[in-house]
Amino acid sequence: MTATRRLTYLIAASLDGFIAGPSGDDPTGPDGFWPVTDDYIRFLTEEYPETLPSVAREALGITERGSRFDTVLEGRRTYEIGLAAGVPNAYPHLRHLVFSTTLETLPDPAIELVRHDPVERVRALKNEAGGGIWLIGGGALAAALRSEIDELVVKLSPLTIGTGIPLWGADATFEPTMWTRAGVTPLPGGTTVLHFTRA
């Protein structure tokens, strides 16, 4: 059976290839360093509304589910950023999976906790009926799923940070992979959205 669903790693990255600072905290949070401009929010609202967390969707009055993704995947560290902010499920409008070998339970029963091989679970997801699958991060989970990623969408910020968590996490192996450019969207505030498909 051929997989019909696609896995998209859609992530913000600095010019020097980092998705977060060394602490792994939310770079767009109250103490964050990431430039979040009005045009960036407008782009996400129009093109990827399902990737906005519930708090932002409520603030912006977004009610539509979106048309690109119906499932979101995230690793433990990424999930715990929202949890620390008092949000046990930042994406209740999506089917939500959290991958962790250390967590035993999750506070929201609507979220599926995956404690085994992420590649096996994602391959099973791809063979189910449904829409696109969005990998939010973090880098370690993205590295584990690198062979399964069909699309790479990088919201490239006009920012360098020097060090932090790389796109594929700190422990990624050397694995040259070619991608085909599928689109480039420059935003007035300086972010450039780069869309690639696996070559």
Image (spheres, rainbow, N blue to C red):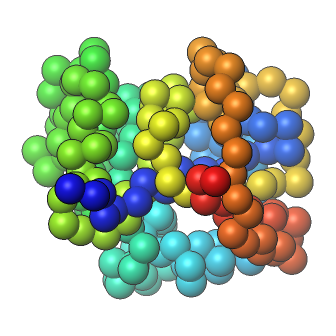
Between residues 98 and 132, which one lies in front from this camera angle? 132
In this rendering, the count of numbered labels is 0
Between residues 130 and 158, which one lies in front from this camera angle? 130
Whether 68 is drawn above or below 85: the answer is below
User: In which quarter of the view is residue 160 placed?
Assistant: top right
Residue at 67% x, 38% y is: 177
Whether 186 is drawn above or below 125: the answer is below
Q: Is residue 108 visible?
A: no
Residue that extends furthest to the front in the rendered view of this protein:
1
Whether 112 is drawn above or below 187: the answer is above
User: In which quarter of the view is residue 130 placed?
Assistant: bottom left
Residue at 79% x, 44% y is: 14
Is 48 left, or right, of 13 in this rendering?
Answer: left
Between residues 181 and 139, which one lies in front from this camera angle? 181
User: In which quarter of the view is residue 54 placed?
Assistant: bottom left
Spot occupied by residue 163 in the image (x, y as percentages of width and height): 80, 24
Spot occupied by residue 114 in the image (x, y as percentages of width and height): 22, 32
Spot occupied by residue 48 in the image (x, y as percentages of width and height): 52, 73
Residue at 65% x, 80% y is: 42
Is 101 left, or right, of 107 in this rendering?
Answer: right
Quadrant (top left/top right/bottom left/bottom right) for the N terminus: bottom left
Q: Is residue 166 visible?
A: yes
